[in-house]
Amino acid sequence: MRRENSQRRRPGSREPADRILVVCGGDVTEPSYFEGLRQFHRNPAIKVVIRKKSVDPVNLVAYAAKLRDNDPDSFEDVWCVVDVDDFDLEPAITLAARKNISLAVSNPCFETWLLLHFTNQTAPLTCYMEAARVLRGFVPDYCKSRLDFGRYADGLDAAVERARKLAEPGREHLANPASGVWALIRKFEGGHEPL
């Protein structure tokens, strides 16, 4: 026989998490990572959106602003996850500042962020191909289309600390390697450090 609990459950004392929109471009690597992170933190207040066309950083920022502006009360923070790759980021940085959108920039690519889960990568990386090759030294079957967040979860805190040491937030596009994803991770965790 099941016993009914006559006491009401107390509401949690933790502040509710910010509602965060994360807009990623291109393939499934970044969205898979952030969806896994969202589930890891059990945070339904985070929405991850992938933009498959016009993924250059300026178009990504404009798309994120449009999503937010269509429903202005839905999100407290809007982030775009961008790679330096071969893009000139200055126009995207200017637009993001004007539209009040945060950028999580990885130089040269998102795989730089993934590498930081395993090692203190300080040697410059020339391109995605080199970053992926180095990453496969830690994740031999790494594939952009099949990212399992569980393989990165244990190294998350180390990645945040390593990334913080590599570059000044907001200027990751000037350093190689570097990734500003750490600041977005702090937001996922409820941290409120200056970005």
Image (cartoon, rainbow, N blue to C red):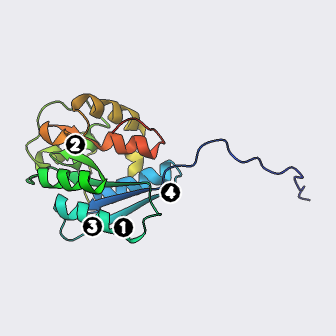
At 90% from the left and 52% from the top, the residue drawn is 6
Instruction: Characterize the local packing of mark 1: few (<14), some (14-19) or many (20 or more) Cα atoms within 10 angstroms.
Output: few
Q: Quadrant of residue 162?
A: top left
User: Who is closer to the viewer here, 170 or 154?
Assistant: 170
Residue 162 vertical position relative to residue 70 in the rendered view, above or below: above
At 15% from the left and 43% from the top, the residue drawn is 173
Residue 65 in the image, given as x and y percentages of width and height: 30, 63
Image quadrant in which the N terminus is located = bottom right
Task: Indicate the amino acid at tag 2.
Answer: Thr
Residue 9 in the image, given as x and y percentages of width and height: 78, 49
Q: Which residue is mark 3?
A: 63
Disc with the residue nearer the chain's start (3 vs 2): 3
Image quadrant in which the C terminus is located = top left
State the SS at label 2.
helix
Q: Which residue is mark 2?
A: 112
State the SS at label 1.
helix
State the SS at label 4.
loop
At 44% from the left and 38% from the top, the residue drawn is 192
Task: Indicate the amino acid at tag 3.
Answer: Tyr
State the SS at label 3.
helix
Give the Cα separation between the discs numbered 3 and 2.
24 Å
Give the Cα separation between the discs numbered 2 and 1.
31 Å
Q: Which residue is mark 4?
A: 45
Pointer 1 with pointer 3, Cβ within 8 A: no
Residue 69 is marked as: 1
